[in-house]
Image: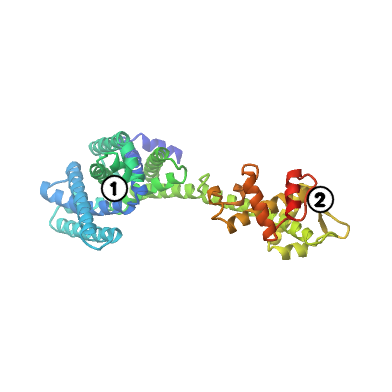
């Protein structure tokens, strides 16, 4: 396979197609990042389907195949379709998704009608217009690739120059308008970039699949970072790699179109990102959830030990009592039990029962006290609203005032929630407060 790839790379036509698809992928990934974040994913689909009648009309007017005229016709058709979408949204009760669906159907249907008319009136198939539906990268020549490369470079350059304006309009359009940024101009410019990125991909990927080329690299990049600048770079890299991979696969597989293979490559990269991304990936989330479940199980079993000991079980606690106190799966219970033994929080008696050690009482006391104090905070949240606590881990006794601490301890006594087991290592101040409350 490697020899076949190296042999094909010596072919000038393959080299041109490889460069064209790589630049197309980079441009699509960069522009698609803004499209995704602005929640306009269907815009690319609408522009791609709307481009077909533009290509057909350009052929009817020019009389022969010319990529530059096809691109102009597709761009005009895309802009016209976006104008109609806005007209429908602004002057009717139809929502954006419905307006996009209407325009996609009408323009694509009109394009198919024109394509059928051209084919039935001679020279239709020879013109290669049907290649624009599913793409035909192999039909590109050096002049086509040069034109695509120039447009892709211009798209990337404009995005880099107006990065700050696009960023503001994407995340905070009201603030952007407030500081004097011409929102309408930059919105129109971004729409033009989307149209151009769609148009240059029509011959390579086709009308049907171009929306995936615009969105899939951006979605993949979103899993790897929370920063827009990094997302744009990663999206461009994924788009470029998708173009290169799809082209190379097409050269060594007989009869396989380049466009679909590019989309498959992009989809595989998306699946890899979906599963293996370090923070947002499914594997990372599963491991984090498993870790949280294990941590929670350890805390729950320790709380059960403390509660049962607090209620008078000084002669030992059975496994059955622990599982009845708080429902935990057998596997997690065994894990929690092992952890507590390793930390020397519990010890096993001769009769098979369990008992808290002094270290276990200390750890259990801190856990129970923190939890019950947080319960008091939640029950009297309006009184302590300025603390702005979200979880019990946010409640740090060393960082709150003595007045708040005294009030929380008093509420524990008032609601009969004061921990009864005091560790020997507890501070004299805590012992004093607890004794006074009791």
Identify the residue at horizontal 56%, vertical 54% (top origin): 383
Q: Could you say where residue 147 lies in the image, as x and y percent from the top left? A: 23, 37
**Badge 1 density bin: few <14, some 14–19, many ≥20, Cα 10 Å:** many
What is the quadrant of residue 189 in the picture?
Answer: top left
Query: Element type at marker 2?
Result: loop
On residue 428, the disc is none
**Residue picked out by circle 1:** 136
Q: Looking at the picture, how far across and down is residue 98, in whole percent?
A: 28, 61
**Residue at image point 75% right, 62% down:** 322
Horizontal and vertical percent position of residue 61: 11, 49
Q: Quadrant of residue 233?
A: top left
Q: In front: 325, or 220?
A: 325
- Which of 348 and 194 lies nearest the eye of the viewer? 348
Give the residue at x 85% y 60%. 315
Please, is residue 330 above or below residue 188 in the view?
below
The Cα–Cα distance between marks 2 and 1, rounded to whole angstroms, is 74 Å
Which one is closest to the eye, mark 2 or mark 1?
2
Could you tell me residue 222's position as x and y percent?
A: 43, 45
Residue 9 is drawn in which quadrant? top left
Residue occupied by mark 2: 357
Q: Quadrant of the C terminus?
A: bottom right
At 28% from the left edge and 47% from the top edge, which residue is drawn?
136
Q: Where the N terminus falls, by quadrant? A: top left
């Amino acid at each position: 396979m490697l020899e076949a790839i190296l042999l094909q790379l010596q072919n000038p036509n393959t080299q041109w197609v490889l460069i064209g698809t790589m630049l197309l992928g980079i441009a699509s990934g960069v522009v698609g990042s803004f499209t995704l974040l602005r929640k306009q994913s269907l815009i690319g689909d609408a522009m791609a389907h709307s481009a077909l009648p533009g290509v057909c009309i350009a052929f009817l007017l020019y009389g022969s195949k010319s990529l530059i005229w096809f691109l102009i016709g597709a761009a005009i058709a895309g802009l016209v379709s976006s104008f109609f979408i806005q007209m429908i949204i602004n002057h009717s009760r139809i929502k954006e998704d419905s307006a996009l669906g209407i325009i996609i159907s009408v323009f694509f249907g009109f394009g198919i009608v024109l394509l059928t008319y051209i084919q039935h009136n001679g020279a239709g198939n020879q013109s290669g217009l049907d290649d624009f539906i599913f793409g035909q990268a192999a039909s590109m020549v050096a002049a086509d690739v040069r034109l695509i490369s120039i447009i892709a470079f211009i798209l990337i350059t404009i995005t880099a120059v107006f990065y700050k304006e696009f960023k503001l309009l994407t995340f905070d359009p009201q603030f952007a308008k407030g500081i004097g940024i011409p929102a309408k101009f930059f919105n129109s410019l971004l729409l033009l970039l989307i149209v151009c990125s769609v148009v240059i991909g029509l011959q390579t990927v086709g009308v049907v699949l171009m929306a995936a080329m615009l969105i899939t690299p951006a979605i993949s990049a979103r899993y790897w970072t929370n920063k827009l600048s990094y997302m744009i770079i990663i999206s461009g890299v994924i788009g470029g790699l998708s173009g290169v991979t799809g082209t190379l696969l097409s050269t060594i597989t007989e009869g396989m179109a380049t466009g679909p293979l590019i989309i498959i490559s992009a989809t595989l990269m998306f699946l890899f990102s979906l599963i293996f991304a370090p923070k947002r990936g499914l594997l990372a989330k599963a491991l984090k959830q498993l870790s949280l479940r294990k941590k929670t199980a350890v805390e729950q079993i320790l709380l059960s030990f403390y509660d049962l000991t607090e209620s008078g079980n000084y002669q030992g606690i059975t496994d059955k009592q622990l599982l009845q106190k708080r429902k935990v799966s057998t596997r997690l219970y065994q894990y929690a039990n092992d952890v507590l033994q390793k930390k020397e929080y519990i010890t096993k008696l001769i009769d098979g029962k369990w008992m808290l050690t002094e270290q276990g009482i200390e750890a259990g006391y801190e856990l129970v006290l923190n939890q019950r104090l947080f319960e008091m905070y939640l029950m009297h949240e309006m009184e302590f609203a300025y603390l702005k606590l979200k979880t019990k881990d946010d409640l740090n006794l060393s960082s709150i005032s003595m007045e708040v601490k005294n009030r929380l301890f008093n509420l524990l006594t008032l609601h009969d929630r004061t921990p009864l087991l005091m560790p020997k290592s507890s501070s004299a101040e805590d012992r004093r407060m607890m004794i006074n409350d009791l």
